[in-house]
Image (cartoon, coloured by chain):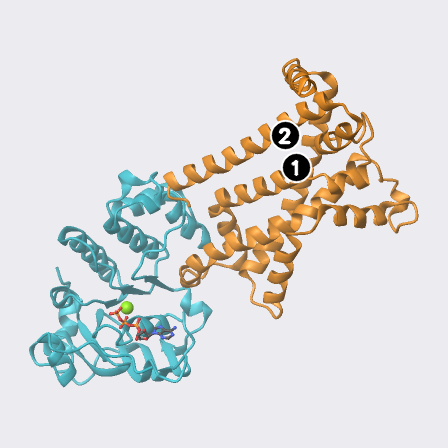
Chain colours: A cyan, B orange
């Protein structure tokens, strides 16, 4: 269920004069761990509101872009800015990320949540169960986290990320191997966070999901920005040839040139 | 042959009747080796964790050194501690030579590198797995270290058990710094070594039986820990 502000975003951009004020920005972003640039000069303005979906073929650099935006990787060149300031530890603390592969502590479900609450200096058991109930894991609070099913693990990592109350939430294909019900559950949680004002940046290969969630779409190809468009124009009339090919299922997997 | 079966019979009787001399030796062995393990863990765990998590120059050299020290020959450790503690040595004034304390020190020196090297491996493996998630959550180094040690607790317990197994079975170090003095520094391994040469096969065999039982129990405990850890997906 898209909320009002998202729809307003979609309508007002790009028809209206100004897109929403950028929150995240990259300037000439390059990531080149060896000879080949894996992220090759990306200039982006990520709107402050709404759900930004990142798409692109396998190996396009989506996960790397997320890591750079979240400060997990240091760019070879260029800058990442949030709210106009270069990314630093203080800004990073206000962000959270759900990784493609869940990494859970070897503890109970509840203890995984308690761990992050303690980091932010406030762990009450009422809060832990509230958070777990929100993602439907209340019943499993005392189970070892690593024995949960894939979908349950993803819900737990999402709950853990949200427990830090992030301003920006990055999600890297969080529903890649989940059944429709678990996918819907994750999307509902993401939408609730979005409604509370959390900026969502979401990588997915699932076109249906992208259509359901996206307010704007960043399309990457071979480490470069192919296009960044409002969702409706991306799906109805993509600006780049790469995006058109991808949407029609014709964009081939990029061969690593190393 | 006659002698041997007689000695075996006597040995079992000694063990089963809980012979006071035998019990005293076993108790001292356990006391010395358990204390040594405790000290080795206090020293070795922080070192192992620091090396596992740290990124500093010469880290590889430190790892190689720790791994090499794991194979220290007990007699050499015994000799070094002897030189330190003997009357002419720098710590001679402490009058520790031929006391259980000296034996504890020697065994602690022997197994601290084992605890450090093995725990480094355990913690580093887990740290690699958690690193990016921890960075994403901005976990401070201290909390990260505590979390790693706690989550690796089953593996670290097996590390401590490995250290204990090595300490309790070791003879070279404790015989040099302890001297196998009856009722004072006589432990299972030194007693076996010396009673055998003196011909008291029954006591030696009895102690041998106990030592093997302990070794088997340690291994069983390690197996049980592994199974528990795997069952609860902590491994
Ligand atoms: N640390 C690294 N060193 C060298 N190459 C890397 C490194 N990390 C990623 N790559 C390469 O960079 C490219 C982009 O990787 P990335 O993980 O961002 O792709 P992706 O768009 O997320 O793909 P997928 O859809 O498969 O998840 C890939 O070819 C990958 O092999
Ligand atoms: Mg990826």
Residue marked by disc 1? B169
Say which chain tag 1 marks. Answer: B
List the single residue furthest toward the front.
Answer: B1
Q: Where is residue A211 in the image (x, y as percent from the top left)?
A: 12, 68
In the rendered structure, which disc, 1 or 2, sits on the residue that comes first in sequence? 1
Q: Which one is in front, A234 or A177?
A: A177
Q: Residues within 10 Å of mark 1 (few under 14, many from 20)?
A: some
Quadrant of residue B38 in the image? top right
Q: How many marks can you see?
A: 2
Q: Which one is in front, B234 or A83?
A: B234
Residue marked by disc 2? B211
Q: In the drawing, what numbered circle is on residue A248?
A: none
Secondary structure type for disc 1? helix
Decide if residue B142 is on the left or right side of residue A237.
Answer: right
Decide if residue B147 is on the left or right side of residue B200.
Answer: left
Q: Which one is in front, B212 or A13?
A: B212
Quadrant of residue B184 in the image? top right
Secondary structure type for disc 2? helix
Residue drawn at the location 76% of the way across and 39% of the way down: B174
Say which chain tag 2 marks. Answer: B
The answer to whether residue B43 is visible is: no
Quadrant of residue A221 in the image? bottom left
Residue drawn at the location 42% of the way across and 82% of the way down: A76
Q: Which one is in front, A49 or A80?
A: A80
Badge 1 vs badge 2, beta-carbon distance below 8 Å = yes
Q: In which quadrant will I find the C terminus of chain A?
A: bottom left
Q: Position of residue A58 (x, y in %)?
A: 23, 72
**Is B14 placed above or below B89 here?**
above
Q: In which quarter of the image is ligand 2?
A: bottom left
Residue drawn at the location 72% of the way across and 23% of the way down: B201
Ligand 1 neighbours mark 2 (CB distance < 8 Å):
no
């Amino acid at each position: 269920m898209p909320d009002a502000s998202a729809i307003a975003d979609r309508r007002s951009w790009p028809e209206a004069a100004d897109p929403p004020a950028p929150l995240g920005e990259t300037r000439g972003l390059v990531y080149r761990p060896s000879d080949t640039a894996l992220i090759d000069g990306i200039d982006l303005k990520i709107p402050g509101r709404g759900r930004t979906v990142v798409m692109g073929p396998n190996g396009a650099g989506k996960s790397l872009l997320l890591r750079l935006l979240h400060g997990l990787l240091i760019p070879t060149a260029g800058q990442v800015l949030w709210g106009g300031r270069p990314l630093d530890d203080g800004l990073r603390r206000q962000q959270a990320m759900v990784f493609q592969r869940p990494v859970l502590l070897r503890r109970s479900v509840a203890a995984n949540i308690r761990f992050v609450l303690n980091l932010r200096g406030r762990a009450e058991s009422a809060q832990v169960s509230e958070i777990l109930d929100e993602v439907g894991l209340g019943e499993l609070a005392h189970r070892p986290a690593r024995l949960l099913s894939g979908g349950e693990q993803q819900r737990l990592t999402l709950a853990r990320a949200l427990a830090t109350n992030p301003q920006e939430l990055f999600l890297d294909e969080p529903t890649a191997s989940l059944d429709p019900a678990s996918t819907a559950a994750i999307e509902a949680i993401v939408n609730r966070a979005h409604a509370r004002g959390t900026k969502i940046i979401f990588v997915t290969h699932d076109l249906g999901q992208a259509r359901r969630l996206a307010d704007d779409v960043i399309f990457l190809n071979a480490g470069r920005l192919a296009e960044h468009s409002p969702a409706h124009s991306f799906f109805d009339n993509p600006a780049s040839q790469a995006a058109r090919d991808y949407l029609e299922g014709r964009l081939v997997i990029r061969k690593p040139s190393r | 042959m006659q002698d041997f079966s007689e000695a075996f019979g006597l040995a079992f009787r000694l063990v089963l009747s809980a012979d006071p001399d035998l019990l005293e030796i076993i108790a001292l062995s356990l006391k010395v080796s358990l204390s040594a393990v405790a000290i080795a863990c206090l020293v070795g765990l922080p070192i192992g964790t620091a090396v596992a998590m740290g990124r500093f120059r010469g880290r590889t050299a430190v790892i190689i050194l720790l791994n090499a020290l794991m194979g220290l020959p007990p007699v050499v450790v015994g000799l070094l501690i002897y030189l330190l503690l003997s009357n002419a040595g720098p710590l001679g004034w402490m009058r520790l030579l031929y006391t259980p304390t000296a034996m504890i020190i020697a065994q602690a020196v022997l197994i601290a590198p084992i605890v450090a090297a093995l725990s480094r491996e355990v913690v580093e493996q887990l740290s690699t797995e958690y690193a990016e998630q921890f960075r994403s959550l901005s976990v401070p180094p201290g909390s990260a270290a505590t979390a790693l040690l706690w989550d690796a607790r089953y593996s670290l317990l097996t590390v401590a058990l490995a250290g204990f197994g090595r300490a309790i079975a070791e003879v070279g170090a404790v015989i040099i710094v302890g001297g196998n003095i009856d009722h004072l520094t006589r432990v299972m391994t030194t007693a076996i070594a010396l009673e055998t040469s003196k011909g008291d096969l029954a006591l030696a065999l009895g102690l041998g039986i106990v030592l093997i039982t302990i070794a088997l129990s340690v291994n069983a405990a390690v197996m049980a820990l592994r199974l528990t850890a795997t069952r609860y997906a902590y491994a």
